[in-house]
């Protein structure tokens, strides 16, 4: 998949522009059926970080759109961050009842520069027509370890 990503940083304000275009899957006559464009914004003010992204596109003939907004607070004097996120995806904007909505709250602990642990709970609210309704209804608690190498 061809992705073009552009970050624009102005002081504590960051803008992200993403463009995703179709690619050749199995040769010059076969292409994937995905195309999307989106962007994001990130703003840091002291220990508070606001971030959001929006994406719109087409996949398998369905016109989709999604976005999220996140608020994070770095706990002073600790390697910990509290965060809350709201996200929404409409997997087919031409059909009703195909939204997936969720609210996530969590804690991130930075073990060192390249390793962090994240504990989060996601409150999920999919519409009855959402394609993965049975797999996403209800809540989900996760514990993740992320290592950058």
Image (cartoon, helix red, strand yellow):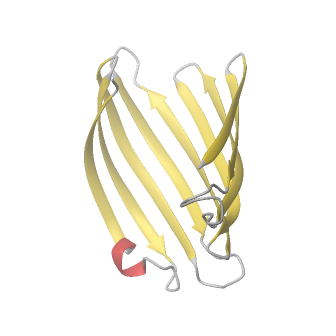
Q: Quadrant of residue 6?
A: top right
Question: How far across and down, in percent of the image, does residue 143 sit?
Answer: 24, 46
Considering every residue shown, the one lying at the far front of the view is 28
Q: Is residue 80 above or below residue 53?
A: above
In the depicted view, which residue is nearer to us: 61 or 72? 61
In the depicted view, which residue is nearer to us: 59 or 13? 59
Question: How far across and down, in percent of the image, does residue 103 sit?
Answer: 47, 57
In the depicted view, which residue is nearer to us: 148 or 141? 148
User: What residue is shown at x 64% (from left), y 43% (from top)?
Assistant: 3
Q: Is residue 27 above or below residue 127?
A: above
Question: How far across and down, in percent of the image, does residue 14 sit?
Answer: 68, 27
In the depicted view, which residue is nearer to us: 93 or 45? 93
How many marks do you count on the picture?
0
Q: Is residue 64 above or below residue 104?
A: below
Image quadrant holding the C terminus, namely top left
User: What residue is shown at x 60% (from left), y 35% (from top)?
Assistant: 50
Q: Quadrant of residue 63?
A: bottom right
Q: Is residue 83 left or right of residue 97?
A: left
User: What residue is shown at x 55% (from left), y 28% (from top)?
Assistant: 48
């Amino acid at each position: 998949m061809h992705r073009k990503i552009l970050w624009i940083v102005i002081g504590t304000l960051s803008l992200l522009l993403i463009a995703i275009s179709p690619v050749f899957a199995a040769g010059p006559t076969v292409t994937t059926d995905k195309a999307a464009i989106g962007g994001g914004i990130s703003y840091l003010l002291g220990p508070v970080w606001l971030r959001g992204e929006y994406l719109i596109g087409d996949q398998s003939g369905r016109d989709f759109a999604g976005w999220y907004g996140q608020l994070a607070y770095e706990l002073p004097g600790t390697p910990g961050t509290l965060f809350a996120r709201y996200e929404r995806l409409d997997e087919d904007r031409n059909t009703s009842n195909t939204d997936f909505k969720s609210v996530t709250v969590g804690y991130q602990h930075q073990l060192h520069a390249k390793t962090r642990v994240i504990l989060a709970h996601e409150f999920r609210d999919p519409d009855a027509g959402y394609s993965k309704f049975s797999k996403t209804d209800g809540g989900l608690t996760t514990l993740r370890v992320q290592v950058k190498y």
